[in-house]
Image (cartoon, rainbow, N blue to C red):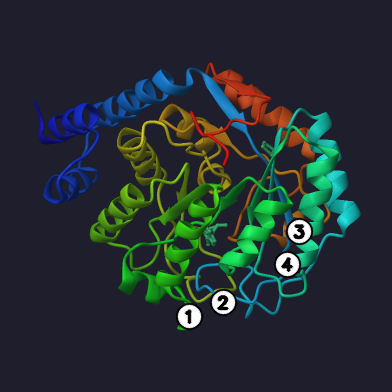
Amino acid sequence: MSEVTELIEKLNTEGDLGDDEFLRLLGCRRTMTGNERDELRRTARIRADSVYGHDVYLRGLIEFTNYCRNDCRYCGIRRDNRELHRYRLTDDEILECCEEGYDLGFRTFVLQGGEDPGFSDDHLCEVVHTIRQRFPDVAITLSVGERERDVYQRFFDAGADRYLLRHETADAAHYRFMHPAELSMEHRMRCLYELKDIGFQIGAGFMVGSPGQTDRCYLEDFRFLQKLQPHMIGIGPFIPHHATPFKDYPAGTLSDTLFFISVLRLFFPKALIPATTALGTIDPTGREQGILAGANVVMPNLSPGNVRPDYLLYDGKICTDECAGMCRNCMQRRMQSIGYEVKEVRGDYPGFVYA
Ligand code: 5AD
Ligand code: FES
């Protein structure tokens, strides 16, 4: 048996690896044969099937503001990008997205935006409350960055049930390299623990192949995720954006991203793992391949067509010319093409109990 096959088998039976073993497995990914890659993906997919069968959960993504007070070096909507047209949806526009999404069968809405000081916490609470009243049976997910604990509590009390906040990297030096000095990894991690403590289903995650990332960074990511135990883990390739300091760095690769999806599935069998838009951007069938490598969630875009090109986190982002119905149907077809079925359900973490 080859070294990589042995490590995968051990990971699959024990659900964990020692630090050295983990780093050896990551080293192997550079020289794995096609057969070994297939074997890893198959093993991870069998794991995912054992929890989720052939169901793929749908999340409707509403990108409601692209204003951001932060200046992350990788991100296209960073504050310093002066060439970007900024927008903020009105309450009515957000509700129309939900209305349309609900009619298309979505039972989870993800309200995502930059850290927009012009959209107050009270205002966001009102929007959440309105959505909660209008659609009692949907899951409301927020993805609006770092806030104070009492604000998170107010979001929760207003009716939000989930919160996505990628930790981005659990390696302190890498975090400093990717972010301006005023942002700290400790604060970001604290936010995640607070969100979980309040009772949100939480999502963390990181980019694959980002500038300055080493195999040790991934090790830190996995150890952090093992401590945090988030319900969702979102990963996607880093993709350069032309108006950012990281514009000249290469994108993360499809094979690395699929590798990490599979390894995540074996470490976290029950986790919700999305096949992300970034994965669909670096390869036309990236999302299908992501599902086949062990992912079980897709997040079609529900944002109004006219603002989609402005929510450009990275160059080449797909689905900016489409409308909600097109993405919904496209995704259904894509999943059916590989023998999977999108499910019109909330899709909670298995066994999750609300406080
Ligand atoms: N390439 C890929 N993903 C990116 N994100 C931000 N900028 C990029 C980029 N250039 C990801 C971050 C963030 C999520 C919303 O999008 O991980 O948390
Ligand atoms: Fe948007 Fe395919 S999911 S066009």
Type of amino acid at the residue the image marks with label 2? Asp
| Residue 125 circle label | 3
In the rendered image, residue 209, in percent from the top left (x then y), is placed at 38, 57
User: Could you tell me which secondary element the residue under label 3 belongs to?
Assistant: helix
Residue 304 visible in the picture? no
Q: Which mark is residue 180?
A: 1
Instruction: Locate residue 62, reporting x and y percent.
Output: 73, 49
Quadrant of the displayed image that contains ligand 2: top right
Is the residue indicated by label 4 positioned so its CB lies within 8 Å of ligand 1? no
Mark 1 closeness class: few <14, some 14–19, many ≥20 residues within 10 Å: few
The mark nearer the N terminus, 2 or 4, is 2
Which residue is situated farthest in the right direction here?
92
Q: Is residue 104 above or below residue 190?
A: above
Q: Earlier in the sequence, mark 3 or mark 2?
A: 2
Q: Is mark 2 on a helix, strand or loop?
A: loop
Q: Which of marks 3 and 1 is in front?
A: 3
Q: Which of 97 and 73 is in front in this view?
A: 97
Amino acid at circle 1: Pro
Q: What residue type is labelled 4?
A: Asp
- Counting residues from the start of the chain, the first of labels 1 and 4 encountered is 4
Could you tell me how far apart the alpha carbons at marks 3 and 1 are, in whole angstroms? 29 Å
Marks 1 and 2: CB-CB under 8 Å?
A: yes
> SS for tag 1?
loop
Distance of label 1 from label 2 (alpha carbons)? 6 Å
At numbered mark 4, what does the secondary structure look like: helix, strand or loop?
helix
